[in-house]
Image (cartoon, grey):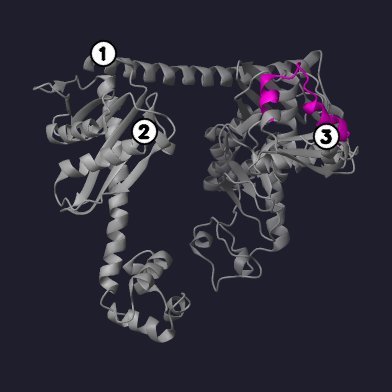
Amino acid sequence: MDPELLSRLSTRPGVYLFRDAGGAVLYVGKAKSLRPRVRSYFRGDSSHSMKTRELVRRVADVETIVVGSEAEALILEANLIKEHAPRFNIQLRDDKRYPYIKVTTQEAFPRVFVTRRVRNDGARYFGPYTSVGPMRKALDVVNRLYTVRSCRYDLPREAPARACLDYHIGRCRAPCVGLQTQADYRGMVDEIVRILEGDTEGLRGEVEAAMREASAALDFERAARLRDVVHGLEALGRDQRVHRAQGGDMDVVGLARDGTLAVGVVLRVRRGLLLGREAQRFSDLEDEADADLLASLMSRYYLGGGTARLADLPAEVLLPRGFADQETLSRILSEEAGRRVVASVPVRGEKKRLMELAGDNARHLLEDRVTATAVAADRAEEALYALQEELDLKVVPRRMVCFDVSHIQGRETVASAVVFENAEPRKAGYRRMKIRGEWGNDDYRSMAEAVDRYFRRLGEEEGGVPDLVVIDGGKGQLGAAVEALGMLGVSDVTVIGLAKKEEEVFLPGRKDPVRLDRRNRGLHLLQRIRDEAHRFAVGYNRKLRTKRTLRSDLGDVPGIGPARQQALLNRFGSVKGVKEATPEEIARLPGFSMVLASRVLTYLGR
């Protein structure tokens, strides 16, 4: 890195981006003072980790963004990491996209429904629900007790001419046609929000009183419905309750680590009730300290995770340990909440117990993940070793390539080559090709051409020579592939054929096929790669046939040559798509006019 460039960097707070020679962002970091922080990477310090030394080796350019404070730098860093996902930053991903209950409080007449997408739209989001059971119980209580509209009208700007069926069966009071006032509807939504926030006890007393009144008035049907609501509120309270902690509103953070894997957990406790648990997972860790993992989790959870988390900030964030930006994070969250939010490490009492509970959750999730990874790896190893043993292979077939040929009566002949590494698809290595030779229905020659072209280009491809080549077919296809490899001088590759009918495995030089037990994991692996090659080839064949069908139907239209046929194909995708298009849409294509568009539609029978 140019020392002159580094000496000109600002000493103010900010964010720096390291880019490689192609301009891709390798790393995003923040600094109280940009110049000394960035220069520290390029001093040849032997204490740097291997990861940092490799990062410095790849850096071709440095971009800096000056901000006004450390807090602004922390926020900007979180957003840039989320945007660029740099390779050398700690990799942190959501464990899965959990569902939320969304209350569209920004609307005049709010709706309540389930969503997995959190947006900055002013709505209230409750969750995430890591278990669907509590979410369904909450919605069941809401639907039994309240008449929330299910329509998507933008009330009161849009409104139907009459009430829908929901009104007539008692599931909605028809605010769309003015039969329920906005104030009354809003009061109902406020009570729904109370339930979702965890305040079920006070509401349960109100419902019990209404149930007794209905029973005294001999309205037993309404009393039975309210009884079910009471039971639902009780169940919801039991599912959510952790304990009545002092203050009651807090996020509790847990962290567990095993080598290069780690899991972070945030328990959301409101009013002493556990409303959700969100898990984040780390991968590709090397020598990062636990404090750095916690800092990454906190900044990206709160500052890079959207407005839903900032809209419902607790009074406290309980941490398993301290980290460098702890005070800065507290200050940012306090500003967002408009009140004091404290990030602290509890040392005793109920808060310490809660923090340990979060740690137990993190360890449980990490154990599940490590176990699942190990089980998957064990199964892959088992299948590979079974295949080696049954077929008497010289090496464990960790890298496998499978070929398939697809055509319809000798037309649009294509071939596919799919790659499996350690018994799993490696889609970056997939290849498909249109067979150039006019072989018609001769699958043997088509297979020979596909194998020949693939191995001729293999020196230019990453990954190297496969340990095992699988041919979709019997003796004929296998013989063609072996002959093609012999012509290329490739002799160190094992080739087998897998025939569909009896799932027999053919080997060169052996008269009789090998029949594997139907429960053999090696056979299951061969079937998987064969089916994947077939799927990939058929998909390409179907795509070419679609193009040919469109061109053949349009080929008789005067003035529509290959270029215009391709333009129609690219824009509308199929003959049906062209037929459904308007003359104006077709005329907007390059090289078309209204006269030509009308001619096309006339020839297609419009």
| Callout 1: SS | helix
**Tag 2 residue:** 419
Q: Is residue 257 above or below residue 233?
A: above
Q: In the rendered structure, are the residues bearing label 1 and label 2 in contact, judged by CB atoms less than 8 Å apart? A: no
**Tag 3 residue:** 3
Residue type (three-letter) at the residue carrying disc 1: Glu
Look at the image and say whether residue 51 sits in the magenta stretch. Answer: yes
| Callout 2: SS | strand
Task: For the C terminus, give its image quadrant.
Answer: bottom left
Q: Residue at the spot x=12%, y=21% of the render?
A: 510
Q: Nearer the viewer, residue 603 or 402?
A: 402
Residue type (three-letter) at the residue carrying disc 3: Pro
> Does the image show residue 245?
yes
**Tag 1 residue:** 389
* In this picture, residue 235 sits left or right of residue 205: left
Q: Residue at the spot x=60%, y=42% of the render?
A: 100
Q: Residue furthest left?
A: 511
Q: Is residue 182 above or below residue 145?
A: below
Q: Nearer the viewer, residue 445 or 556?
A: 445
Look at the image and say whether residue 498 sits in the magenta stretch. Answer: no
- Work out how far the residue at label 1 is from the one at label 3, CA to CA, in angstroms: 59 Å
Residue type (three-letter) at the residue carrying disc 2: Val
Task: Read off the magenta span.
Answer: 33-55
The 10 Å Cα crowd at callout 2, few under 14, some 14 to 19, many 20 or more, is many
